[in-house]
Amino acid sequence: MTGAPGITTLHGKNIFFVGLLVAASGTITPPIALALGILFGFTVEHPFPSESNSLAKLLLQLSVIALGFGMNLKQVMHAGRSGFVYTALSISAAIALGLLLGKLFRVGGKASFLITVGTAICGGSAIAAVAPITDASEEEISVSMGTVFLLNSVALLIFPVIGYACHLSQERFGLWAALAIHDTSSVVGAAAKYGNEALAIGTTVKLARALWIVPVSLLTAAFAAGLTGNPRGARTRVQIKIPWFILFFCVAAAINTYQPRFASTYGTLSHLGKIGLTATLFLIGTSLSPRTVRQVGIRPFLQGVALWIVVACASLLLIYRGWISI
């Protein structure tokens, strides 16, 4: 059986392994890895669907832990202290609005939640952290990641242009980028084009916002456990699925902050986390096929775009008028 004309099962396996090696080589970016995976899924019948699914979930968790070694808790806490209340309110509002839009667009529960959390907090990292807790399928993760990374690419191009058009200062642009662009890497890319001060502010504020992965993940775990109760309302003993990898993520960040003697090692581990996430995105992308796209439809993408536009416009307006500052 073949997935595309002229592609045998053996060739499909070879293409899969080559693509995975390229994604794990550190020579391509996460969006490119996801694009390669999606290209594979659309042209070749997946030779290892179940094995790829298991490996993707494991790599997601290990990558999130390794990324913790790239965080400095002191800098992040300092940047996030003054904006703690606003951050909590904005994340809560974004999640509420995202779930509402998911219902309006009639998006499946898990895909809707992943897109919402990714937009509200820190894009692919938040999706990577929450997806294993919700037991989301590879298709749901792939659609969510694809939506986030596509919007990240758009933001890299248009945010500096908008910033100059609105005459935003370095400080204001860095703050806006941190609040409205999904992934930290894309915040860094957009802010670096604007200036060094924008880069410093955007990076620290975004990292402070990324810490909200922890409470959101714990609340997600508790909520997911509640959904496993008896549908008839009978009392059942529900066991919460604790996201231990989030705890290890915090431990890694604490070690990096308070044990700086091994800074070079921590940098290597953080880099490996980024490579692991890149390889994971390739695996996730391979699960997306014409059949899954027909099943999921365009609605999740429309939900992500609508939520992102509202978050970006609202945060820009508040910053422009001076109602939000650091």
Image: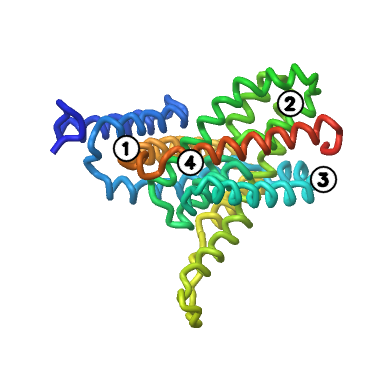
Residue bearing mark 3: 82
Of the residues shown, which amino acid type is indicated by label 4?
Arg
State which mark lies toward you, 4 or 1: 4
Task: Examine the rendered structure and indicate whether residue 263 appears above or below residue 237.
Answer: above
Of mark 2 and mark 3, the one earlier in the sequence is: 3
Compare residues 288 and 62 and report the one nearer the observer: 288
Q: Is residue 188 left or right of residue 62?
A: right
**Residue 278 sits in quarter:** top left
Q: Residue 200: image x %, image y %? A: 72, 29
Residue bearing mark 4: 299
Of mark 4 and mark 1, the one earlier in the sequence is: 1
Residue bearing mark 2: 198
**Residue 10 sits in quarter:** top left
Q: Which mark is residue 279?
A: none
Q: Residue 182: image x %, image y %? A: 60, 36
Q: Which mark is residue 289?
A: 1
Of the residues shown, which amino acid type is indicated by label 3?
Ser
* Callout 3–callout 1 Cβ contact below 8 Å: no
